Amino acid sequence: MVSAISVQSRLLMIASLVTLSLVRFDALRAQEAAPLPDYVIKEFGQPPAIPEGPLSGALRSAVQVAFIDSTAQSTWGRDQAVALQAISESKDPRIVWIISDLMRFITGRDLSLALADAASRLLGKELQDVIHWGVVTDHLIAWDIPAPPDYLRVKRAIFTSLVPGWDRLFVAGDIDWRFVSWGGVLIDDRPYDTTDDVCNCIPAADNPGVSSAEEATWLKDGDIVFGIGINGAYRAYPRRIMEVREMVNDTLGGRHLGIPYCTLCGAAQAWFTDQLPAGIERPILRTSGLLIRSNKVMYDVNTFSVFDTFLGKAVTGPLAAKKLQLKQASVITTDWGTWKKAHPETTVLVESLALGRDFNFRNTRDAEGPIFPVGDVDPRLPVHEDVIGVITASGRPVAFQRSKAVVALKQGDEIVYENIRLELDAGGIKAVDADGSDLGSHQAFWFAWSQFHPQTALWPG
């Protein structure tokens, strides 16, 4: 067995080797990248120089001790402190992604300060007094700092040592693992149609109970609902329920749907989970407990394939290998009184699905802006401005500022963009094609739509 003294001596040698390797890093050309927008420089300052290529052997050893060993052993001692010191002197800002990942799970102030100090030194910006991981991550995203080599392996070790249920999710795929963070909840991995079982998670609802509009006396006319119409069948999903469940697997109008609601993005979406390519079974969507730039990460509980929730695209696992892209139905955000008047035949989820809770995150927890890191935000609109988002026939994403669109449509103005035409529907807005067919639009906060569609057009321009 190696003694503690020899381990510490080895780590001191690592620190020395990392410092000596600075000569090599100084000789590396800073990574060439597109110039950052002026608004990013104004808010975050100039980014640090980024070395290229693999980490030195000494730096890899320091990363192993500081991040992988510490989480595997649930300890932080002198060995880790020495390794972190070596890392902070490496002049390699790429390592800050790993520091930020660890900061997300740390509750002790002393260690949080030590990690923040290391991040400050590597980023060249005074962040020592800022121990919130989100501030560090915002800088990394805004500056588009690349991930260090072998990043997924290290990140997977950190995350899965704390929540073992993530082990099948943290795999390579068409996903930028830099942006994945913990949302503060555990994974919902209950099998299909067992959602009456209690879980220590955000509990999805499969085949939820519904009632007629007349029976839903618990809903007030002013309560916000997400309305969906499929093949002449209509159903309302009250926001009060969706803020508790965040995911519903349902059948409406003879079609299977997966309906995620991201409270952080103000976005309820409806993805068809049937009529899929041959050999693909209906995905059953669940909340993973993870986020990407403040958007919930959903996955299929049967194959553990991760989806980009906002885009409906499988990005890891067997369904990604089959290039599964879900199609979208429109979701109308409106109030219950207007929805049931427009669609008196509507059904609505039953009150018991709210589990006795009555959240209003939009006007409480999220009122001051995103509570998780999002990096830079397109400055054309305020971060929490509501937009109606849709994709044109040519593949161009476009966002319509909801407040102005409502006024224009009520005045009888026509709103058209390429093949898209907006129309009022039960107090909300949806996008239709020239023949009136549904184009799968939904409402979201501007910060979310513009992040997942960075080349989006904006109406009015």
Image (cartoon, rainbow, N blue to C red):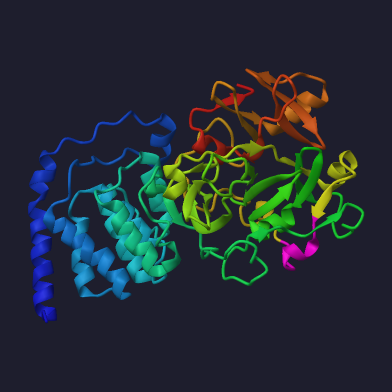
In this rendering, position of residue 252 left or right of residue 2: right
Residue 404 appearing in the image: no
Residue at 54% x, 25% y: name it.
Answer: 395
Position in image of residue 449 (x %, y %): 56, 37
Position in image of residue 377 (x %, y %): 49, 38
Q: Is residue 458 above or below residue 41?
A: above
- For residue 35, what is the image quadrant? top left
Residue at 60% x, 37% y: name it.
Answer: 327
As drawn, the residue found furthest toward the front would be 278
Q: Is 111 within the magenta?
A: no
* Quadrant placement of the N terminus: bottom left
Camera-nearest residue between 237 and 60: 237
Q: Is residue 420 above or below residue 316?
A: above
Q: Is residue 198 above or below residue 292?
A: below
Residue at 23% x, 35% y: name it.
Answer: 31
Give, as a single range, the part of the protein colored magenta.
349-358
Q: Is 357 within the magenta?
A: yes
Residue 239 appearing in the image: yes
Residue at 11% x, 55% y: name it.
Answer: 19
In this rendering, position of residue 101 left or right of residue 327: left
* Quadrant placement of the C terminus: top right
